[in-house]
Amino acid sequence: MNPVFERFRLLASLAMHDLWHDRKVSMCIAAALVAVIAPLLLLFGLKFGVVSQLQSELLNDPRNLEIRMISSGRYDAEWLEQLRSQPEVGFAIGMTRSLNTQADLVQDSRHFVDNAEIIPTAEGDPLLASLSLSQPLEGLDVVLSESAARRLNVEVGDQLSLFVSRRLNSRAERGRQSVVVKGVLPAENFPRPAAFVALPLLISLEDFRDGYRIDAFGITTGKVRGEVGEELAENARGEKETQFARARLYAADTDQVGKLEQWLNAQHIDTSSRLADIENVNAINHVLGLVFGVIASTALVGCLASMLGAFLANIDRKRKDLAVLRLLGFDRPAVAGYIVLQASTLTLIAYGVGLILYKLGSEVFNQALAMSSTTGSVVCRITFLHGVIALLLALLVALVVAVVGMLRAFSIEPAESLREL
C-alpha cells in the first residue's frame, strides 16, 4: 500500500481518536461555531429572501421597465433608430398623437368598448412576452387586454369591429375595420381596456383622422396620399415616412432605467418612470447588505477569537502528547496536518449542525411570514451556492485558527517529553 496514504491514515486516526477522547472540549469548540453559523445562515436567508422577492416583483412586472415620454414632439425614423441603438433600450416603437391612439371596439350592440386605447406593438414587446405568440402581430391581428376582452365577450380567434370617427368638410364619418383577436393580455400586465396592434394599423388611424382616404376603412372620401390600394398595409404610410409624437419605450433591465432617462432628459425630453421604486429596492438591498455585513463580521471575529483561545489552550494542555509525537518521528508537516484535520473536522460537524438548525428555523420563519398579509410570499432561503460559500468561509476561519495553532505547536520540542520522565 502507498506509504504516504498509510501515513495520512495513521495521522487522521490519531486526530479523530484525540477529538473523541477530549469530546467535551471538542463539543464546546463545535458549539461555539454552531452559535455563529446557524444565526448567520438564518439572517442571510431572510435578507436574500426579502431582496430577491422585491427584485422578482420588479422584473416580473414589465411596467417597471417602461419610460413614458410626457410631452409630444416630432420624431422621425432616424431618431427612432438612434433610440433603439442605445444599449440601455430593451424595446422601442413609435407612437402617434394621443388623440389618434383611441378607437371604438364593437362585438355587437351589447358588447362594445368606447375609446379603447390602441397601442402599437412589435416583436420583443415586454408586455406581450407572457403570451408566447407564435408570430408577431401583423395586418389586422390584435391582442386585447383582459378588461377589454371581458367587456366585448370575445376569445382568441374571434373577430370584432374597430371603428374610428372623424369630421371632414363639416361631415361626420365613421370608418370600420374587422380585426382578429390573437391573444388576451392578463389584467396584471395591463388593467385598462386596450387593443395592441401592428404599427401600420395605428398609422392608418392617424391618417384617417388627418383627412386622408383609407379605403380599408370603407370610406372613399379624403385626400389621396400617392397611390392608394385596397389593402390596409398599402393604405398605411410606412414607418420611415411617419413623424411620431413620442415613443413607447422599455429599458433592457431595471439597472438601465435611470441611464435611459438621463439620455432622454439630455435631449430635453420630459419623462416619467418607476425609477423611485427601483431605487427603493436597491436601497433596501444596500441597507440589508450593510446590516448583514456588520453582524457577520462581528460574529466571525468573535468566533475566531473563541476558537483561537480554545485551540491554543488545548495545544498547551497537550504539549506532552505533541512532544511524544515529535519524538516518535512526526515532523512539522505531520503536526500541521494533525491540527488542520482536527480544526476542519470540528468545522464540518458544526456546519452540518448549523445547517440543520437553519432548516428548522427557516421553516418557522416561512410559516409565520406566510400567515401575515403584510409579508405575503417573502421567504427565508439560501441557494446551493450560498451554502457552499458559507462552508468555505467556515473552513477559512478554521484554517486561520489551525495556522496559529501550528505556530504554537512548532515551538514544542521532542525533548520536552523526556523531561517529564
Image (cartoon, grey):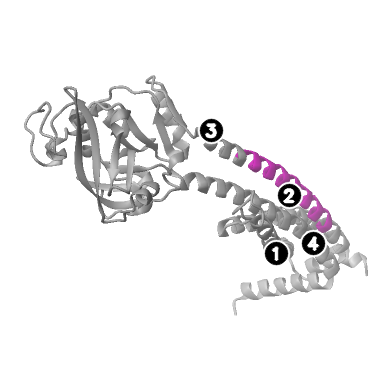
Question: Disc 4, disc 1: CB below 8 Å?
Answer: no
User: In the displayed structure, does residue 333 sit left or right of residue 202?
Assistant: right
Q: Which residues are the magenta region?
A: 286-311
User: In the displayed structure, does residue 373 sit left or right of residue 121?
Assistant: right
Q: CA distance from mark 1 to mark 3?
A: 37 Å
- Give, as a three-letter code, the residue at label 3: Ala
- Give, as a three-letter code, the residue at label 1: Leu
Q: CA distance from mark 4 to mark 3?
A: 45 Å
Q: Is residue 241 above or below residue 416?
A: above
Question: Disc 1, disc 3: CB below 8 Å?
Answer: no
Q: Quadrant of residue 161?
A: top left
Tell me the residue that label 3 is attached to: 276
Judge the density around disc 2: few (<14), some (14-19), many (≥20) Cα neighbours within 10 Å. some
At x 61%, y 57%, the residue is 381
Closer to the observer: label 4 or label 1?
Answer: 1
Mark 1: which secondary structure? helix
